[in-house]
Image (cartoon, rainbow, N blue to C red):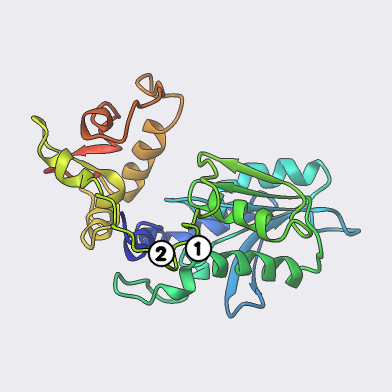
Amino acid sequence: MISRRQLLHSAGLMLAGAAAPDLVRSAESSGIRSRQIDNNNGLVMHVLEAGYEGSRHSAVILLHGFPELAYTWRHQLTALSQAGFHVIAPDLRGYGLTCRAPVTYADELVPYMMMNRVADVLGLTRALGYEKVAAVVGHDWGAPVAQWCALTRPDVFQSVVSMSNPFYGTPRLALNTANSSRSPGAEIDIQKELAALPRPRKHYLWYCASEKANDDMWHAPQGVHDLLCAMYHFKSADWPGNKPFPLKAWTASELAKLPAYYVMDLDKGIA
């Protein structure tokens, strides 16, 4: 299984950098407000918001994914505010202008655990003066946070939208094991199996979680801008090769059917 440390590192380190202020200025030119808010959970969060003028409206909170920022939602911010909502999109913990210092591979993981990320959103909601919000919307890396916001505090988050990431359910813990011994089941080393294919491969998630991946992406030969444009294109409906289909099993031969930006050539990076 991929470790929590690896998952943290895959969460978007290259977006906590110099480009964020330029994106904020771009959003503000469209009538979107940028500000920093103490979220009641030990963090000062940068947010973009729209629909905040005048009387109190119902709120909608938008949680971005990887590799993204609050800026991802700039078009939805405007459209939802025109529909009468106060719409808030934060840079999540570890991203953009919420990240006050560079995140490193060896950083402590506790602040990034799921319930703390949920507390970030709940604390931000209350800091903004809301006891309830109409919806919490999560895309990609933000989707599990939105899901668990709705699961743990349905009194606050009255509806949830999950984009590009299904809900995998609550943990299923073994029952009645106190007086019996259990032998651990054999785990499939999918990375080893992928590397042993005739065309050696590796799964992108493990690559993105490696210590070298962030540096590889920062120093992509085509530049970060063109790298991100290509990533978004290949994951969109505009790429003609993007034709999803169900896999039959979690095996190397089945995973190898996926596009190479997901199951990569063993000797290549994302760039």
Horizontal placement of 85 versus 267: left or right?
A: right
Q: Nearer the viewer, residue 27 or 195?
A: 195
Where does label 2 land, which residue? 18
Q: Are there few (<14), some (14-19), or many (20+) residues within 10 Å of tag 2?
A: few
Which amino acid type corresponds to the residue marked 1 in the rendered image? Answer: Pro
- Percent x, y of residue 23: 51, 55
Horizontal placement of 39 versus 105: left or right?
A: right
Q: Nearer the viewer, residue 25 or 208?
A: 208
Residue drawn at point x = 20 percent, y = 47 percent: 189
**Image quadrant assignment for residue 197:** top left
Residue located farthest toward the bottom when viewing the structure as drawn: 42
Where does label 1 land, which residue? 21
Horizontal placement of 7 versus 163: left or right?
A: left
Residue located farthest toward the front when viewing the structure as drawn: 179
The quadrant the N terminus occupies is bottom left
Q: Nearer the viewer, residue 201 or 124?
A: 201
Residue drawn at point x = 25 percent, y = 44 percent: 270
Q: Secondary structure at mark 1?
A: helix
- Percent x, y of residue 238: 44, 24
Above or below: residue 71 compared with residue 176: above
Which amino acid type corresponds to the residue marked 2 in the rendered image? Answer: Ala
- Percent x, y of residue 253: 21, 29
